Amino acid sequence: ATRPSPIASRLYKMSEDEARDKAMPMPDFQTSISNGDYSYLSPATPAKGKSRAISAYALGTPAVRPRSARTASGKECSVWPMSKDVRDCNDTVHKDLSILPALQVILDSPPVQRLANLNQLGCASNTYPCCTHKRKEHSLGVMELAGRMATLLKQKQEQLEISEKDVLCLRIAGLCHDLGHGPFSHAYETFLKAAYKNEKEHPEQYEERNRKFKEEHGVDMPPIPEKYEHENTSLMMVDFALSAVGLEIDWENLDEPLKQIGSGIDRELFGVPLRSGEVEPLTSRDMIFVKECICASPLNEDHAPTPQTAYVGRGEMKEFLFDVVNNRHNGLDVDKIDYFIRDEQMAYGSIQSNFGIWLRCAFVTWAECPNPKKCFICKDKVEPVKHLMICYPDKLLPSAMMFYATRIKNHSNVYTHKKTVSAELHTVDLLLEADKHSCMLLNTQANDPFSFPVPSTFDSFKYQRLPISRAWMYPRLFLRMDDTIISIIENKVIENPLPRLDRLRRYLNDHRCHRFYKCVAEIEIGLEGAHDKLWEKSEDDIKAELIDMDERYTVNGELVYLYPEDVIVEKRTLHYGRKEKNPVSQVRFLSKSKQQLLSEPVDKLPEAEQIENLPNNTPREFLRKTLRFFCRNNDKYEFVCHVFQQWKFQRENPGCTYKNFSDNDNDDDDDDTSQPDSQPITQDDDVELLVSPRKRKESDGGESSTQAKQRLRF
């Protein structure tokens, strides 16, 4: 151990009374700052007769000092310069990460720190226990890859004039691109869709909640939009992250430093450190560029004074920068590269593909627009426009198909695995039930005199609390919306022992015990059934057909019926990234002979083309459609299996493939390719239809087949 300093030794040996008598009283920090007195921050030499405890304050003297400034509205505030140190940290995928000072400011803000409580794959940890990595890790990975790709492009093609500020903005966009995700990943979006439908069909279930809300706020409950996009919420949280450090975008002065709206980071010293020691501040145009990189489109009326028809953050000659984080042309971007690598490592234990090649081999050149009908630039043009795009050598054509194949493999085996979806469906039902009973989220900054300022765009939103289905509308409430929401709901239910909350208590108990819904069967609609009438029907219509089978069972001597709430019908589409289209056809490649022209001026760069000759690993079809049936009531699982079999026999779908699942929840197979161990419906000597349970070993102590027949007899 190192020897303590003389000052520390003397302070340690002092008694508490001596230290109190000899020490100088701590100054009033707030008063000193407002009066411009920073003497307490300076190292001082204690005078004779005074305690050396004064120097103890000097040991912790901060390297930066606040200064007095005024906000745009004339209010006095205190601002600090950002740190000049680069923070290094380790990552399980990319090893070493370097976090620049401006990125540290954004990283330490509450909206970004909230990502530490969000699982990247939501409920997938119920299928793959190691899939517990957080969205904060993924965001840091995207930040790092965005910086690496931009730096490599800058070194390869200097004529593109990529600046250090461009690289910093791309890294900020990578860090903030997932700020709008709710609890349990995409399950929250499914919950909002279900809440919209349920409130529309059963408004009587929300009468008491809405009445209490109107009594408290004097206005009606704000409605849920029919479609929710987490990218728009991400843009809102970017504004909130800036407000947390006292800054805001100023649309009237785009090329000036960000607007100072309160105490926090000095707007003149928030940006790119230069070699001279000065700082090139980030402007409002730069932060608009960050938001445009996240949504991959011009900003709409919710995030701009008027709807924008073109990019504002950067000009046409830097259009390729918008495709680094979110590639609107073909979906091959650093966001997918990171979560493909990270999710494969966590789920499968190893990285099965080499994705780093997409950073090393990327270059920028001209290419014809792959999506002229959806492109905001080309949709009104007669002929597709040529864009400056991120393109690749033609030798990477087979690797491109493997890249997109990784997507459908992960979606099939991990993201939409039957166990993952069963947990998500149960979580959605839990949130729906909680949303009916005034389960509000309290404002985290309520009655806090030191709360960080709120952007002016939210000043008119004064609700202190909102239901779970509306918490995303206000950033302070959305801070509470992470995977701990189940614990918040549980605490409220414990405090209110009301009978109307019994159903919610059962959901919470099942969630704690991992008693989720069981998957009954899956129907895959093949090529012949791509336009089958079955797929064209809604989930509710298909469910109604099952209920109309009018089957009855006696379980343990009691007559059992099937109700609509007992069955869930899920439509699932699996594709390679562009639905029924081949995603590789939207990637532009350059031949080896033309790659020698990449050092030419920007206007003379060669044109990349679509390759017509597809690789041998190209699949026959790029879109898979499946119907899956889940049972909410585990006591009726075998009954639902029987009803499904009866319904299947009455339909003629030659293009469909049927797969039945057993009720064995203890198997460790983590893919849907395993053969189901369920048995078909059989008949006994009396020609009575039965459902045979799964095969049981004699050592299991389970009931025999004869006992099962007696229990399941009509």
Image (cartoon, rainbow, N blue to C red):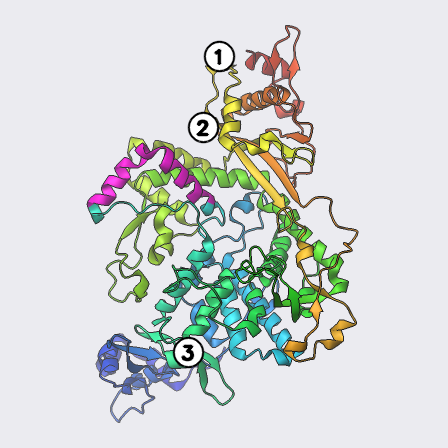
Instruction: Find disc 1 in the rendering and name its residue.
Output: 557
Q: Tell me the crowding category of disc 3: few under 14, some 14 to 19, or many 20 or more residues within 10 angstroms, Cα based.
A: some
Q: Tell me the crowding category of disc 2: few under 14, some 14 to 19, or many 20 or more residues within 10 angstroms, Cα based.
A: few
From the image, state whether disc 3 or disc 2 is nearer to you: 3
x and y, in percent, of residue 589 in the image: 71, 64
Q: Are marks 3 and 2 in contact (CB under 8 Å)?
A: no
Q: Which residues are magenta?
A: 190-215
Q: Amino acid at mark 3?
A: Asp
Instruction: Find disc 3 in the rendering and name its residue.
Output: 255
Task: Please name whichever residue, 570 or 175, is drawn nearer the observer in this view of the structure.
Answer: 570
Q: Are marks 1 and 3 in contact (CB under 8 Å)?
A: no
Instruction: Find disc 2 in the rendering and name its residue.
Output: 565
Q: Secondary structure at mark 2?
A: helix
From the image, state whether disc 1 or disc 2 is nearer to you: 2
| Visible residue check, residue 352 | no
Q: Quadrant of the C terminus?
A: top right
Mark nearer the N terminus (1 vs 2): 1
- What's the magenta bit mostly, secondary-structure-wise? helix
Residue 49 as seen in the image, left or right of residue 482: left
From the image, state whether disc 1 or disc 3 is nearer to you: 3
Locate residue 639: give its quadrant. Answer: top right
Q: Tell me the crowding category of disc 1: few under 14, some 14 to 19, or many 20 or more residues within 10 angstroms, Cα based.
A: few
Residue 476 as seen in the image, left or right of residue 92: left
Q: Residue at x 44, y 47 (%)?
A: 227
| Visible residue check, residue 535 | yes
Q: Amino acid at mark 2?
A: Glu
x and y, in percent, of residue 485 in the image: 40, 48
Q: Secondary structure at mark 1?
A: loop
Mark nearer the N terminus (3 vs 2): 3
| CA–CA distance in space, label 3 to label 2 | 57 Å
Q: Amino acid at mark 1?
A: Gly
x and y, in percent, of residue 711 in the image: 55, 14
